Image (spheres, rainbow, N blue to C red):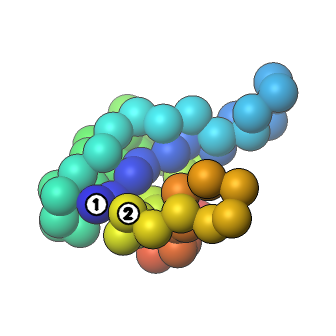
Amino acid sequence: MYQVYIKKETGFDPKHLIGEFKDFDAASERIQNELAKNPELKYIIEETTGRVDNYGELIATVVEEN
């Protein structure tokens, strides 16, 4: 599962989830559509496997970031 976040400069949580996708191509396509609207957009694409850490937090690996 891939999660796509937009980075924000302000607020409590610096990243905002805009979608979850089963494959990387769909996640990449979504971010390309968002970049077409705003070329200076900062984003993160994370991959999750469903595993959690000792605190119950989902373990995610950053796949792509600008």
Q: Mark 1 falls on what kind of element?
A: loop
Q: Quadrant of residue 20?
A: top left
Query: Height in image: 24 above or below 56?
Result: below
* Left or right of residue 22: residue 15: right
Q: Position of residue 41 (x, y in %)?
A: 55, 44
Q: Quadrant where the C terminus lies?
A: bottom right
Viewer-side residue, 27 vs 48: 48
> Residue under circle 1?
1
Kind of residue indicated by mark 2: Gly
Tell me which label, 1 or 2, sits earlier in the chain.
1
Query: Height in image: 44 above or below 60?
Result: above
Task: Give me the C-alpha separation between circle 1 and circle 2.
Answer: 8 Å
Residue at 81% x, 24% y: name it.
11
Outermost front residue: 54
Residue at 41% x, 49% y: name it.
4
Q: Are marks 1 and 2 in contact (CB under 8 Å)?
A: yes
Kind of residue indicated by mark 1: Met
Using the image, tell me which numbered label, if any, was put on residue 50: 2
* Left or right of residue 22: residue 10: right
Crowd band around label 2 with a 10 angstrom C-alpha radius: few (<14), some (14–19), many (20+): few
Outermost top residue: 11
